[in-house]
């Protein structure tokens, strides 16, 4: 694997999960992994201001090359309005080591 890798983690309300996945793929993500979770904390604080936040969340993980991270994250932010209060949040972490990552191209028979 050439180049450094990063992990984009996106946490959104469950109803926005598929839109976030679609935005990531459209923006160049080679693939995503997602699962469901439950959030608490900021949900109660924002409800005071009249913003309803669902407890059910979808967590989306995207491993990508460092060169593609900004494009992917910007696409998600734009498509689902992630920069608006109550829409969710995202963060990026450096991946120290990657095994089995496949971004495309020719597949060779391991035999």
Image (cartoon, rainbow, N blue to C red):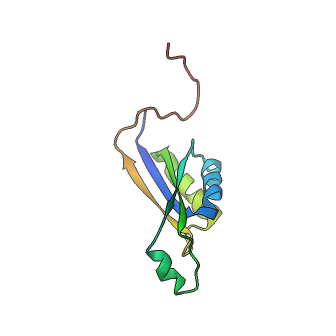
Q: Position of residue 102 (x, y in %)?
A: 52, 33
In this rendering, the answer to whether 8 lies above or below 109 is below
Q: Position of residue 57 (x, y in %)?
A: 54, 63
In this rendering, the answer to whether 29 lies above or below 58 is above
Q: Residue furthest left?
A: 96
Question: Which residue does the image show at 60% across and 57% down from the upper left?
Answer: 75
Q: Residue furthest top?
A: 111
Question: Which residue does the image show at 55% across and 46% down from the upper left?
Answer: 32
Q: Is residue 84 left or right of residue 44?
A: right
In this rendering, the answer to whether 19 lies above or below 64 is below
How many numbered tags mark residues here?
0
Question: Which residue does the image show at 51% across and 81% down from the upper left?
Answer: 46
Q: Position of residue 86 (x, y in %)?
A: 55, 74
Q: Looking at the rendering, in which quadrant would you find the N terminus?
A: top left
Q: Is residue 104 left or right of residue 9?
A: right
In this rendering, the answer to whether 92 lies above or below 56 is above
Q: Quadrant of residue 17?
A: bottom right
Q: Position of residue 85 (x, y in %)?
A: 54, 76
Question: Which residue does the image show at 56% across and 59% down from the upper left?
Answer: 74
Q: Is residue 57 left or right of residue 97?
A: right
């Amino acid at each position: 694997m050439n180049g450094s890798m990063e992990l984009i983690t996106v946490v959104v309300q469950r109803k926005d999960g598929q839109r976030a996945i679609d935005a990531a793929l459209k923006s160049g993500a080679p693939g995503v992994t997602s699962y469901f979770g439950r959030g608490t904390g900021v949900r109660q604080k924002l409800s005071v201001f009249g913003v309803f936040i669902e407890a059910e969340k979808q967590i989306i993980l995207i491993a990508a090359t460092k060169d593609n991270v900004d494009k992917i994250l910007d696409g998600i932010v734009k498509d689902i309005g992630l920069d608006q209060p109550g829409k969710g949040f995202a963060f990026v972490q450096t991946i120290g080591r990657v095994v089995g990552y496949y971004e495309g191209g020719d597949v060779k028979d391991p035999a």
